Image (tube, grey):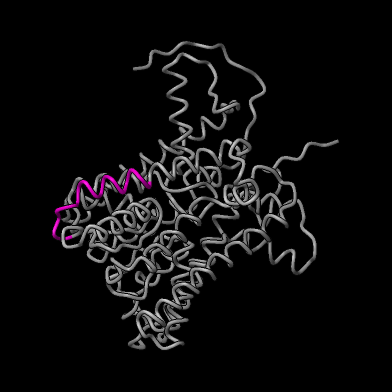
Amino acid sequence: MRRVRAASFSLGGYSHPAQVIATGFSTAALIGTLLLMLPFATTEGVSPGWLTAVFTATSAVCLTGLVVVDTPTHWSTFGEVVIIGLVQIGGLGIMTLATVFTVLVSGRLGLRARLFAQAETKTPTMADMRKVVRKVVVFSLVCEAIAAVVFTLRFLIGYDEPIGEALYLGVFHGISAFNNSGFTLWSDNVIGFVTDPWICLTIAAAVTVGGLGFPVVFELLKSWRHPSRWSVLTRITVVATIVLLILGTLVYLATEWRNPGTLGALDDSGKLLAAFFLSSMARTAGFNSVNIGELYPSSWLFTDLMMFIGGGSAGTAGGIKVTTLGLLAFVMWAELRGESKVNIGHRQISESAQRQAVTITMMSAGLVAVCTYVLLVLTPHSLDRVLFEVVATFSTAGLSTGITADVTVPGQVLMVLLMFVGRIGPLTIGSALALKERTRHYELPEERMIVG
């Protein structure tokens, strides 16, 4: 029987699933750009500049949430629908949607389609991709619907919005929250709801669930009562998520407690809610209930770290992922103890997974460093603000200190590219650009290097 390798397939000249995924996201961003450049996409009925359309479309499809124009005042209802449509496409994944269409049209799923869908959803096996994709779509729509219902009822009852407007706001922000995009229909994001637990906690819950990653969510739904049966992926993701949520809340409370521009003006319960909300958003989404530009520099630095880490694998969050961080922590622990193998629980982690974790982290850190330097050259802003902007762009977290619209044209072009790379992933981009995969059929003599 012949062995089947993913890299041996081709589709339209692309020999690797990663290349197809990258092309799919590029195509979605291009279509979104063309739609946003239509005159009736803006409230003034005038076609926006190409850079504004490109930046907004890329930010939407990459689930970033950074904007160079005010969303509710600049874009018409048509433009807003295009933006949230791109968010939905980016959240489900181009290849996931393509797989759904393949199943609906042909009634069956070929090996190529399974390979591409597996690359997008990052499922460990290729068992039944139709079932996996169906679960992803249904789960996403159900979560968005639940959030939309809560928002709609809150706007309808708590803020006396007309039923049509309440429903529109509910659906838009339900999709935006679950997909970790951070797009809102208010000029001050959600600062006006800083003490409203119905709005803030619903957003935080939707963002957290969407950011866990579909493999983890499905495993939790199946065996949430039996943590001992959880896979290493689920254990690391759940524990790291809880630890970072608590740590972030405590750090923001301690740092911003007396800051009059953020938590200082709130009562104790309001401070706790705002700190928890900020901790929830810092790793994954661009919603903000306090003015990020008013945070102390120490909080900016901590937020940089949180955004860089990101959320769970195969979810709607960005960053290097909590699983990467967790794996690196166990690699360090094994090295400090002098162990030749890395073990987590009762499982041994493969060397290829360790190399991937190191590669993703180093590529990401290097990319952030280079882009920070370039953006510092292109803009007059300080290092702390520029670094924050670059990390938020790369991690698709979408938070901003308020300088996005002031960045020069070359700087905004750089940010567009950085959003794209951050959404697809450095490792996926690297494999997509590779002409082919090579397997070495011999081993070289080993030599001991001096490290440190």
Figure check: 46 above or below 451:
below
> Residue 398 is drawn in which quadrant?
bottom left
Whether 422 is drawn above or below 149: the answer is: above
Point 38% across, 47% down: residue:
245
Give above or below for 431 relative to 134.
above
Q: Quadrant of residue 244?
A: top left
Q: Position of residue 395 (x, y in %)?
A: 39, 51
| Residue 267 appears left or right of 37 | left
Q: Residue at x 71, y 53 (%)?
A: 129
Image quarter (top left, top right, bottom left or bottom right) of the N terminus: top right
- Residue 68, position as x, y percentages in the image: 30, 68
Across and down, in percent, residue 239 comes to 47, 40
Residue for point 36% across, 88% down = 45
Q: Nearer the viewer, residue 65 or 282?
A: 282
Quarter in which the C terminus is drawn: top left
Residue 415 sits inside the magenta stretch: no
- Determine which quarter of the picture holds residue 322: top left
255 drawn magenta: yes
Q: Which residues are magenta?
A: 245-261
Q: Where 450 falls versus 251 (above or below)? A: above
Which of 448 and 285 lies nearest the eye of the viewer? 285
Q: How many marks?
A: 0
Q: Give the side of residue 392 with respect to residue 97, left or right.
A: left
